[in-house]
Structures are given as structure tokens and as C-alpha cells.
Amino acid sequence: MTAVTFPPLLSGVQAPRGADPFAKAVSMAAMGCDAGTLVWEAGDAGLRAALVFAPEVSLAKSMAMVFAVGSGLADALGALGPPELAVQYRWPGELRVNGARCGRLRADAGPPSDGVPAWLVVGVEIAFALDGAAPPGARPDATALLEEGCGEITPQGLLESWARHALVWINRWEEEGMRPLHRDWTGRLTGVGGPVVAFGREGVFMGMDEDGGMLLRRGEGAVETIPLAVMLEGRGP
């Protein structure tokens, strides 16, 4: 593998082989590493990476970075993959390629001070090859990039492209707010208007509120909002 290059605002840290880049990024963030630290691990099976942020707004508003990271990944796949590649998300962060599960987004945040989290880490995971240990047909809802005609995409190439596209979306959020991210994700979401089970709640997925929370109609009652922050590791609704 040649040296991985990132945009000037990001500082890449390669995780040790077999280590979880997301867990390492969380540990580094808790110890006070710089914002823009990007911890990654890329191999034949897939890509895992996590980006550290230093929020300046409330947790609810900071969670927009999940959308920025996710839109960046979708754009990178669109730029590198075949034209017919369909990239979607199932709320809050399941990545789906051509209708099947192919990866996920992750997030964790530090303790708040005056409502602002001390740090935020957003991670991506995407499969390049299916687990050969599973028998054929055991997971019909799972796929990998090689199964979807993406043999020309390399983990390193996707990592570098994702980093660039994610920064574009982060800059758009800083300049324009949540609206463009909300619009991009609304076009990528699956299941809107249908029944859904989310974090122990059942209802009809009605879309997202202005901060990306799920709008869930339960029975004949009012619409309930499930905040995006429920996806934070170790936290529940």
C-alpha cells in the first residue's frame, strides 16, 4: 500500500492491525487529541475509519456531523463506483448499497459542558468482501462492494476520497447549516412512510425533524421524535 494522503485539515493515524479504529479514536478524543484526527484501518475485507470533532454547539446540533460523514461516504462511492450504484441509509446509520446492508455509521460523544459535548467521534465501516465463514445465502440482506461491481475501488482510494468529500460537507454545514445535509439524507433514506422498529419503538417512519431525529407515528397518536443522539455508543433512548 502506498502512503495514504489526506486533506491538510486532517491528520491520519493508522490503527494497529486488528484494532478497532473507532474505539481508538474515542480513546484519543477522551485524552484530548486534536480535532481532525482520523483513525483508520483498511484491508481486503473492508474499510473502517473514525473522525474526531471538537463541537462548539449542542449535542443535538453537533450530530449533524454524522450526516456530513455519511454524505461524504455516499459521494465517494458515487465518484468511484459504477454509475448504477445506489447508496442509501436506513436511519440512523445503516449503509445500504443496491438495497442490501453493506456497512454502518457510528458515533460517540464526550461529557457535556454547558450543553456542548467535550468531543464527538463519527465512524464509518464498509464491507469490501463478504465473510467467507458464512454459508451461501445465510445473510440475504448483506452485501459487499465486490458483490456490487465495485472491483475497481480500493480501500485506500475510498478512504482518501471519503475524507475529501466529508470535508466538503462539513464546510457546507458551517456555511449553510443543516438544510443541505437534511435534503441529501432525505433523498437517501429508505423506509420513509412504512412501518419501522427503532430503538424499541414501533410505528410509521414519517421522516426526520430539522436535527435529523426520526419522526415516528405510533398508532393513531401524535408523532414522536427519536433524537439522532440515541445512536451514540453505550447510550439508549
Image (tube, grey):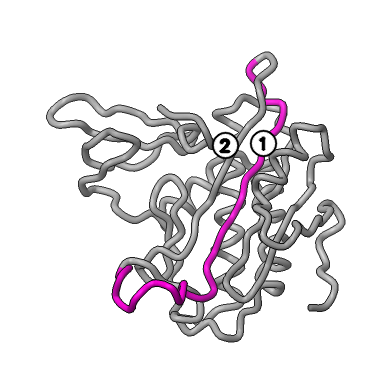
Q: Secondary structure at mark 1?
A: strand
Q: Which segment did they paint magenta? A: 115-140
The residue lying at 44 percent from left, 31 percent from top is 227
Q: Amino acid at mark 1?
A: Leu
Percent from the top left, x then y, of residue 14? 78, 59
**Please, is residue 237 above or below residue 63 in the view?**
above
In this picture, residue 29 sits left or right of residue 58:
right
Q: CA distance from mark 1 to mark 2?
A: 8 Å
**Please, is residue 221 above or below residue 215 in the view?**
above
Percent from the top left, x then y, of residue 198? 32, 39
Is 100 in front, or is 180?
Answer: 100
Residue 183 magenta-highlighted: no
Percent from the top left, x then y, of residue 21? 68, 52
Q: Give the position of the C terminus as an image quadrant.
A: top left
Q: Which residue is mark 1?
A: 120
Q: Amino acid at mark 2?
A: Met
In this picture, residue 216 sits left or right of residue 69:
left
Is 231 in front, or is 15?
Answer: 15
Is 104 in front, or is 14?
Answer: 14
The disc placed on residue 191 is none
The residue lying at 23 percent from left, 33 percent from top is 217
Question: Which residue reaches farthest top?
Answer: 114
Q: Which residue is mark 2?
A: 63
Q: Earlier in the sequence, mark 1 or mark 2?
A: 2
Percent from the top left, x then y, of residue 137? 29, 75
Is disc 1 in contact with disc 2, using a CB cutoff of under 8 Å? yes
